[in-house]
Amino acid sequence: NRRIIIIGGVAGGASCATRLRRHNETIDIILLERGPYVSFANCGLPYYIGGTIQDKNSLFLANVDLFKERFRIDARILAEVTKIDPATKTLTVLNHQDGTSYTESYDELVLAPGARPIRPDLPGIELAGIFSLRTVPDSQQIKDWIQNHRAKRAVVIGGGFIGLEMVENLIQLGIHTSLVERNLQVLPTLDQEMTIPLRTILQQHGVALYLGDGVTAFTQGKHGLNVHTESGKILVADLVILAIGVTPENKLAQDASLNLGLQGHILVDKNLRTSDPYIYAIGDCIEVRNVISGKKTALPLAGPANRQGRIVADMLVGRGRFFRGVQGTAICGLFGVTIASTGLNEKTLKQHNDMEYGVVYAHPNDHVSYYPGAKPIFIKLLFDKNDGRVLGAQAVGEAGIARRIDVIAMAIQMKATVFDLEEAELCYAPQYGAAKDAINVIGMIAANEMRGDLSITHWNEMGKTGSVVLDVREAHEVATRALPNAIHIPLNSLRQRQHELPKHQEIQVSCAVGARAYNAVRLLSNLGFRASLLSGGEKTWFNLDN
Amino acid sequence: NRRIIIIGGVAGGASCATRLRRHNETIDIILLERGPYVSFANCGLPYYIGGTIQDKNSLFLANVDLFKERFRIDARILAEVTKIDPATKTLTVLNHQDGTSYTESYDELVLAPGARPIRPDLPGIELAGIFSLRTVPDSQQIKDWIQNHRAKRAVVIGGGFIGLEMVENLIQLGIHTSLVERNLQVLPTLDQEMTIPLRTILQQHGVALYLGDGVTAFTQGKHGLNVHTESGKILVADLVILAIGVTPENKLAQDASLNLGLQGHILVDKNLRTSDPYIYAIGDCIEVRNVISGKKTALPLAGPANRQGRIVADMLVGRGRFFRGVQGTAICGLFGVTIASTGLNEKTLKQHNDMEYGVVYAHPNDHVSYYPGAKPIFIKLLFDKNDGRVLGAQAVGEAGIARRIDVIAMAIQMKATVFDLEEAELCYAPQYGAAKDAINVIGMIAANEMRGDLSITHWNEMGKTGSVVLDVREAHEVATRALPNAIHIPLNSLRQRQHELPKHQEIQVSCAVGARAYNAVRLLSNLGFRASLLSGGEKTWFNLDN
Ligand SMILES: Cc1cc2nc3c(=O)[nH]c(=O)nc-3n(C[C@H](O)[C@H](O)[C@H](O)COP(=O)(O)OP(=O)(O)OC[C@H]3O[C@@H](n4cnc5c(N)ncnc54)[C@H](O)[C@@H]3O)c2cc1C
Ligand SMILES: Cc1cc2nc3c(=O)[nH]c(=O)nc-3n(C[C@H](O)[C@H](O)[C@H](O)COP(=O)(O)OP(=O)(O)OC[C@H]3O[C@@H](n4cnc5c(N)ncnc54)[C@H](O)[C@@H]3O)c2cc1C
Ligand SMILES: CC(C)(COP(=O)(O)OP(=O)(O)OC[C@H]1O[C@@H](n2cnc3c(N)ncnc32)[C@H](O)[C@@H]1OP(=O)(O)O)[C@@H](O)C(=O)NCCC(=O)NCCS
Ligand SMILES: CC(C)(COP(=O)(O)OP(=O)(O)OC[C@H]1O[C@@H](n2cnc3c(N)ncnc32)[C@H](O)[C@@H]1OP(=O)(O)O)[C@@H](O)C(=O)NCCC(=O)NCCS
């Protein structure tokens, strides 16, 4: 029989194995997993630690018996591949149950070994109580440690998705938690201003936040672990969670002389084949192409791993499938606030000297404000200024975030423009949206800029020489939080009071969220002034400046 | 000055007027509204009656003063246009404040008069206590009637969106409510099986449901209004709500000899211009093109009206804009359940003899089942069997419905195929979705059928001559609700027990929701059987048959 071996039995590997069996009943399929479980829900681990997921068994979506009975797949746990020999098409397996090693031969091989948490080589990194989180045993160790040591203080290092999820879950356990992040923002994959609402909510939940600070060493103190930071702080903790990112599991590939990328990822072609024609690779371990920029990247997330697994199953039965690349859709929840993004962020776009992009902000409500419970969505849209193509979006808020980012994700996939967002026909009833949905609104603003009806001033140019700032909010709003050095004329008085404004200077207009300022910009333009919009109004400025 | 008059001051008319002013400061813009309010939220009226929206003022998104101060628009309420004379470009306005009439002349005219509720010519229709709902005064009358008559029993006639919203709100007020609908289903714009969950929830909330029955007459009884039905029932009620649909406000257009469609809608070209070059029409009163079928239709919803208003504003300042047509996205909430749809339904597709379409059902969860609170989404996807293009989708459930239908709405707008849904990169974290999101799953199933890996049997062919039905659920599941005349072999025993199945008959496979049955179909096909999937499993069958 033809013999296909898959290394790694979770997201990518398991999806590949099951679909391969569905394609063909006679191939021998062997799934090798070094850990004690196949098909577990890595993504649920923070919530298992925090207790939201109570039953550990619910983390297991399949097991060795199910693979055998349902799929006739020979899934082996505690079976670590230690060496691949592409020349003889064999590999060495270390059986962790008895310490013995054996050889297996394959016709084709699929690498789905995932990635491992980065453990920086810092003094004291080996001390007890410093954890990473990747596997079910990792999570059990953390849970047990918390219980056995009655942990009351934790330090989480790294403010990415997993770091934030761990912060939420530790706080949920009543543990005082500090978060140390070297960047000046949490979620470094997003643009900084979009993450400010997260900073606020972290502080509201009592998280001690150390941004722009890195950890230099760990020492064992009398009362716990001491976490030393670059700025000279010493944080005392009963446990430390390392969440500063992952690095691809590439040792097997490297030893087998497969081509690797600059960051150590396994290189694959469009069909997910490595430099060895009999070896495919999928999931966190590979380098992928960003569909928008065309640049090489990595996106260690479960969706791509699952879909790549299916594609390789198809390839293995002779179908010409290819992976379309990634666009970077991601989401994270934090104490009831959701933040999500898709496509390129502005930081990345700034590095593309060739691309002239537009940026608009808005704060539309999740549903119409006349129906109770409406929540604002802080949304940022990036688009190509030449043709209006949507390049990326980021959104944060308490409701409707996944929905709006998913719609824009589909728009980006289909190469939609801002004019398509403007004309999108989406669900509307009062409790669900608006006749002009958030998606339409952000599309309309961008379309207005594309058509030349709206000039937008970037916030970092607010008040630049030769310009004046005009705030068109009502007096009571200005009283709460004023823009620096702004002339104040409420929108409804603008016609009468236009003579108060300079005819030959640029007038940069703001209001609370941008809608009234837009009306002011149009009015002033029609009256012969030079006016531009400070997009997203004072609510955006507050996030930028703070 | 150039003079543009807009008839109708709500969704379409108001949106057109404001954008027109933003384009040009010198045009005289006159907005004529026969009712007492401009810019009100019709869509909120059922919730105002039910008390969820408490403050009537929140229903007004703008008023005459705001139009004047902010937009320099001459908005007039209680100003009804009674006649248009295209030859002289004048119109006659009846001022309801003093009963006088006057003439206005225009350079261009925009018709946005909306639609009016159908009041069938039935005996007794003029009796007090029989209401329609379109305007704020309508809602106030209903509210007052309920209060003044201490109404305890209501009959709602018509199970469309507005009828259902009224049912929910009347029940919320503690009023015993009956719903009479001539069709055999509520929400006749959806396919019947998708509406079964609504029937269930209506019954759970004590609504007396009369499907397949029509009202023939109303009489005044001693204890209330008697509502007589075709089947001979007499329902006694303190109030009746008529919600059997709307008809376009076309009298002015008809009298002015503008071209009308077969259903009486005003005919417009791609630029929303009527048969008179100086008159545009937008909103509920016009006929539009369905972008998928290319057929003429009407979609009396607020989103299209708003977007059409903007387009006509652009046209009026000499920009060549066109309306892309409609795809029929709609949503409705009912006692915590949401139902939504976009694109064509199967009923409509059946009428297109030329189109070979595919249908798949699934019941994926809103988010992964290992995270608490996951809710199933009952989803149906329709696609073109020739190229896989997505034609329509319907979904019902307690969570994530608007999100999934909006994503598919964007997919349809961009002419996406089921292969695009299969590969969509959407938001996933445990509380928000799945590595294979509901959208991916429904796309995968359809893609599997497109690629010939999966043959699907329509439910109405279940058990047809020459076939057997195989149920691969576990025994305890079958015990709860069995499929008629099905062989029962649990999926995991199928390999061993394959000899129990006929080699030369079609084996139609079902499970609970379709996922296990799909695995069985693949296995049986690989073993040389002829197998097909009863898509969506027993959970779908239950909705079809009941
Ligand atoms: C705490 C946490 C939360 C996450 N949350 C999310 C989320 O919310 N959303 C999201 O999209 N993604 C999330 N992810 C990421 C997601 O889990 C991964 O992207 C996905 O699991 C990658 O799939 P994979 O198949 O490439 O690797 P994995 O799922 O990691 O599977 C690889 C397997 O290979 C095994 N293996 C490695 N080397 C060998 C060897 N030599 N021999 C045998 N077996 C080997 C490993 O033990 C491992 O079990 C999260 C990850 C973690 C750790
Ligand atoms: C109870 C209810 C609930 C709804 N719920 C939803 C929903 O959840 N989602 C959704 O998308 N849509 C909903 N709709 C439909 C939505 O309100 C309409 O599609 C939308 O308002 C149509 O806009 P329009 O401008 O064409 O007409 P309208 O908004 O009706 O405005 C037309 C105006 O023109 C005026 N008029 C008519 N004739 C004349 C004349 N001769 N002279 C002067 N004025 C005149 C009328 O008085 C009216 O105010 C709902 C409608 C109702 C009644
Ligand atoms: C459990 C596991 C082995 C199951 O894989 P699977 O058999 O491919 O099945 P899934 O449950 O993912 O469902 C998807 C498959 O069922 C099919 N399917 C799902 N619902 C269906 C329905 N109602 N009707 C027909 N087919 C259906 C899909 O088309 C797909 O099959 P395909 O890949 O051949 O097209 C694998 O998903 C796994 O290991 N997951 C856990 C690991 C993981 O992803 N971790 C990281 C995230 S936390
Ligand atoms: C109230 C009403 C007159 C306001 O219309 P409007 O001035 O066009 O403004 P909206 O509040 O709809 O916002 C949309 C406009 O503001 C712009 N805008 C919104 N937020 C913005 C922001 N943050 N920055 C810049 N521009 C913004 C949009 O681009 C759009 O302008 P455009 O059409 O010129 O592109 C009109 O919407 C109305 O009458 N609505 C109620 C009636 C109705 O729709 N009923 C049925 C549904 S219940």
Image (tube, coloured by chain):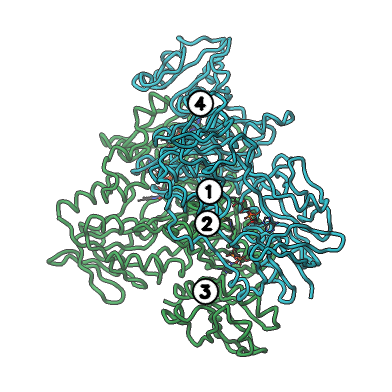
Chain colours: A green, B cyan
Say what amino acid the circle numbered 1 marks: Glu
| x then y, percent, for residue A298 | 49, 54
Q: Where does residue B255 sit, x and y in percent of width and height? A: 80, 51
The yes-or-no answer for disc 3 within 8 Å of ligand 4 is: yes
Q: Quadrant of residue A214?
A: bottom left
Task: Tell me the CA gap for discs 2 and 3.
Answer: 23 Å
Q: Nearer the viewer, residue A49 or B297?
A: B297
Q: Calculate the distance from the C-alpha at mark 2 to the C-alpha at mark 4.
A: 56 Å
Check disc 4 and give the amino acid type: Lys
Do the dots labelled 1 and 4 sit on one chain? yes
Of badges 1 and 3, the one in the foreground is 3
Report the amino acid beneath label 2: Thr
Residue A262 left/right relative to A224 = right
Marks 2 and 1: in contact by CB < 8 Å? Answer: yes
Q: Is residue B13 above or below residue A453?
A: above
Q: Which mark is residue B425?
A: 1
Q: Which mark is residue B233?
A: 4
Which quadrant is home to the C terminus of chain A? bottom left
Q: Secondary structure at mark 4?
A: loop
Q: Give me the C-alpha separation between circle 1 and circle 4.
A: 53 Å
Residues indicated by labels 3 and 4 sit on the same polypeptide chain = no
Where does the image place residue B434, in percent across and percent down from the top left?
Answer: 44, 44
